Image: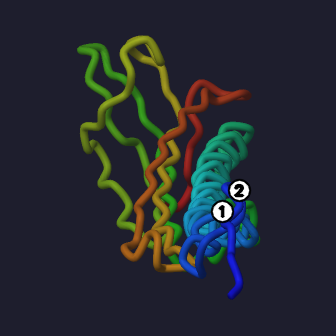
Amino acid sequence: MRIVLHHPHRPKGLLHRFVRDRRGVSAVEFALIAPLMIAFYFGLTEFCQGYMAQKRMGHSAAAVADLVAQTDVVTTNELDDIVAIGGLIMKPFPTTGLTVRVSSVTRDANGVAKVDWSRGSGIAALGKTTVVTVPTDMVANGESVVMAETTYAYASPIGYLLPDVTNFHSKFYSRPRKVDKVGCSNC
């Protein structure tokens, strides 16, 4: 007859050994956390891409308004070239969702801002004498400003995190540099 004494610190069975075993805990923790970390990474990447697209669209509006404001008189062909430069600023993002409109706006003696001329790409030009909203401290009565408006339909390259198109809008004002009001010879 054999007598078996159980040591108090020795595991008693298979289930007890399984509960006490700590090998593989890191792998289980990683398996639980990895999907969240991967989703966070792709979400942050997508946010950065959208933010860059919005910033480039804003820079495009600023460049278009600034280039027009540096001239005395422009033509529709010159405006088309300037708008094309605005599209180049959007690179590496596609320009299919980009619309640009540039207008000369003058505030009359009554404080009403009206369009002198306008040219659009992917968006309709504003009609002459169309009343627009210009910040009150931007121009005084009788002064003029070049207004560039851009919109961009940002489509996510991933599509899972932002499945719908996100529309960005920007409006930029620039004072004429050489003359009181930039003219357009054939607008």
Spatial CA distance of label 1 from label 2 is: 45 Å
Closer to us: mark 1 or mark 2? 2
Q: Is residue 129 left or right of residue 38?
A: left
Report the disc number at residue 9.
2
Rendered residue at 59%/38% (across/down): 182
Q: Tell which residue pokes out farthest to the front in this image.
A: 1
Tell me the colour scheme of the image. rainbow
Rendered residue at 66%/55% (across/down): 8
Three-letter code, disc 1: Tyr
State which tag comes first along the sequence, 1 or 2.
2
Q: How far across and how far down the image is residue 102, in percent?
A: 51, 51
Q: Is residue 58 left or right of residue 132?
A: right
Q: Is residue 51 left or right of residue 117?
A: right
Q: Secondary structure at mark 2?
A: loop
Three-letter code, disc 2: His
Q: Nearer the viewer, residue 9 or 154?
A: 9
- In this rendering, the count of numbered labels is 2
Q: Nearer the viewer, residue 10 or 29?
A: 10
Q: Is residue 76 visible to us here? A: no
Q: Which residue is mark 1?
A: 41
**Is residue 31 positioned above or below 107 on the image?**
below
Report the disc number at residue 79.
none
